[in-house]
Amino acid sequence: MKRTVLLILTNLAVMLVLSVVVSVLGVNKYLAANGLDLGMLLVFAAIMGFGGSFISLMMSKTMAKWTTGAQVITSPQNSTEYWLMQTVERLAKDAGLPAMPEVALYEGEPNAFATGPSKANALVAVSTGLLQSMSKEEVEAVLAHEIAHVANGDMVTLTLIQGVVNTFVFFFARVVGYLVDSFLRRNDSESSGPGIGYTITVIVCDIVFGILASVIVMYFSRQREFRADAGAARLMRSPTPMIHALQRLGGLSPEPLPSNMASAGIAGKGGISSLFATHPSIEERIEALARARG
């Protein structure tokens, strides 16, 4: 409950900040009695679309720690923590990262994730359940997968994709809203400004276009996973450890990460259908690695 409230408050704070920005810049006045200013609307849509995505990216490490309870290892207290630090440091060096990511542990069922605003400022976290249910080689493969996400710049890439589709959602929802409202009031020469038709249409279009946008974003999210699996195979010098780790995950019940972290985990589940899945199926990922192994 505490995590849910935190996410809601954070999202409200982001929306408040963006609302102040567009108000100060004056780009929220794209709709007036004399019509729709498409240039100003595009600027408004870009600020709202990219702004939320980039603020979320900048806050990603902090939010990940808050929502999962992950504790960063600063001084290893036992052999497991020491091994985790050494392994991540070696994998980060092999992947050519400019800096070693922070390493964290959190209580929970098998899962792991990587997040952060840049390759030089990332976080790799694993759950206690993952460490308890896998061999060291399998855990290392999972860590290699997460390091590959960082090396591929996946957090930034997905943020840019999310920003683009959000911009189009904001822009086209309001264009359609204006057209519908104009059609409904075509014989009304007395009223000025947007009517109820505009408001209702924008709300409906925001929802419908947002669902369609999610399909696009989730497609790219699934492609990230294939690339990270391939990256893990390269770092491990063989796809076999990653295949074994995925097979192990397939026989477990990975704990879903909070919604804001879903696409960052090693394992994930689809939504209503595979179109809304953040991750490909375990079977698809193993098949792709097996083809690479030949």
Image (spheres, grey):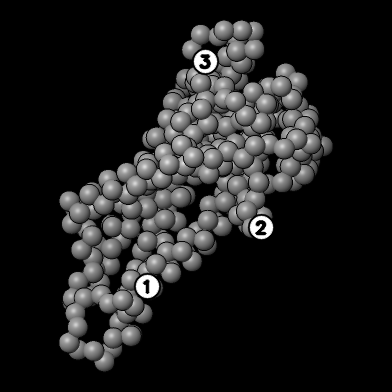
The alpha-carbon separation of the residues under discs 2 and 3 comes to 37 Å
Q: Secondary structure at mark 2?
A: loop
Q: Is residue 8 visible?
A: yes
Going by the numbered disc 2, the residue's amino acid type is Ser
Which image quarter: residue 136? top right
- Cβ atoms under marks 2 and 3 closer than 8 Å: no
Q: Residue furthest bottom?
A: 187
What's the mark number on residue 273?
2
**Image spot of residue 161 (x, y percent):** 47, 49
Residue behind mark 1: 200
Q: Earlier in the sequence, mark 3 or mark 1?
A: 3
Where in the figure is residue 214, as x and y percent of width and height?
52, 56
Q: Nearer the viewer, residue 284 or 63?
A: 63
Contact check, label 3 and label 1, Cβ < 8 Å? no
Quadrant in which residue 193 is drawn: bottom left
Q: Residue at x 45, y 44 (%)?
A: 159
- Mark 2 or 3 closer to N-term? 3
Residue 108 location in percent, x, y? 62, 29
Q: CA distance from mark 1 to mark 2?
A: 28 Å
Residue 205 spot, x, y in % from top left:
43, 68
For residue 268, which numbered disc appears in the image? none
Position of 180 with respect to 93 (left or right) is: left
Residue nearest the viewer, comparing 100 with 4:
4
Provide the secondary structure element on which disc 1 rests: helix
Q: Residue shown at 33%/85% (left/top)?
A: 183
Say above or below: 95 vs 291. above
Label 3: how many Cα within 10 Å (few below 14, some 14–19, many 20+): some
Circles 1 and 2 in contact, beta carbons < 8 Å: no
